Amino acid sequence: MKKIFLFSCLLAAITISSCAQQQVQQKFAVTKTDAEWKKILTPEQFAIARKADTERPFTGKYWDNHEKGTYYCVCCGVPLFSSETKFESGTGWPSFYAPLNKKYVGEREDNSLGVIRTEVYCTNCGAHLGHVFNDGPAPTGLRYCMNSASLNFKKQ
Ligand SMILES: [Zn+2]
């Protein structure tokens, strides 16, 4: 009886630890250590894109950018958003109503700050980009609220 109990405890422990590992180990095409990211990113870019910090509103490079072009991932360079879907949200963060390529713009649940939000991240390297909300304009009704520090804009 004791043996069976020990065995089921062991099984439960293995199941729990493998689930926990699965959550952490999402595979990305581009992976680097923190030290490697720090070499190519500014301290602000590293804190936001790699550690999910948020820049203060109205301080980023792109909230008030009205030039035509494409916004790329600051970490790995894949195209994420176009100036064509950028809109004035009044939030002080660059806001878009749709991603340029859904393949590279992933969503995952974020329970930090005691509220459930939808985090937006780069599916190619795992960079934190911002959050998406349901109060955006037509045609999607979505508001991709991004950090300038996670983006690299190139003029058309
Ligand atoms: Zn990326």
Image (cartoon, rainbow, N blue to C red):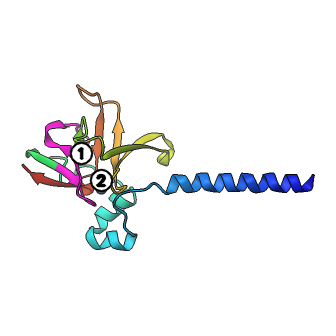
Taking the image in four quarters, ligand 1 sits in the one at: bottom left
* Amino acid identity at mark 1: Gly
User: In the image, is the residue at mark 2 within 8 Å of ligand 1 by its beta carbon?
Assistant: no
* Amino acid identity at mark 2: Arg
Task: Name the residue located 21 percent from the left edge and 44 percent from the top edge.
Answer: 81
- Label number found at residue 92: 1
- Residue 2 is situated, as x and y percent measured from the top left of the image, at 91, 55
Numbered disc 2: secondary structure: loop
- Residue 101 is situated, as x and y percent measured from the top left of the image, at 25, 42
Marked residue nearer the N-terminal end (2 or 1): 2
Query: Could you classify mark 2 by the number of other residues whose Cα lies within 10 Å: few (under 14), some (14-19), or many (20 or more)?
Result: few
Q: Nearer the viewer, residue 92 or 149?
A: 149
Q: How many marks?
A: 2
Whole-angstrom CA distance, mark 2 to mark 1, is 8 Å
Q: Quadrant of residue 75?
A: bottom left
In the image, is 93 to the left or to the right of 119? left
Does residue 41 show up magenta in the picture? no
- Residue 13 is situated, as x and y percent measured from the top left of the image, at 71, 55
Query: Can residue 87 be seen?
Result: no
Task: Name the residue located 27 percent from the left edge and 59 percent from the top edge.
Answer: 76
Q: Nearer the viewer, residue 8 or 44?
A: 8
Q: Which residues are magenta?
A: 71-91
Q: Which residue is mark 2?
A: 56
Q: Nearer the viewer, residue 128 or 64?
A: 128
- Residue 66 is situated, as x and y percent measured from the top left of the image, at 10, 44
Q: Quadrant of residue 102?
A: top left
As drawn, the residue found furthest toward the right would be 1
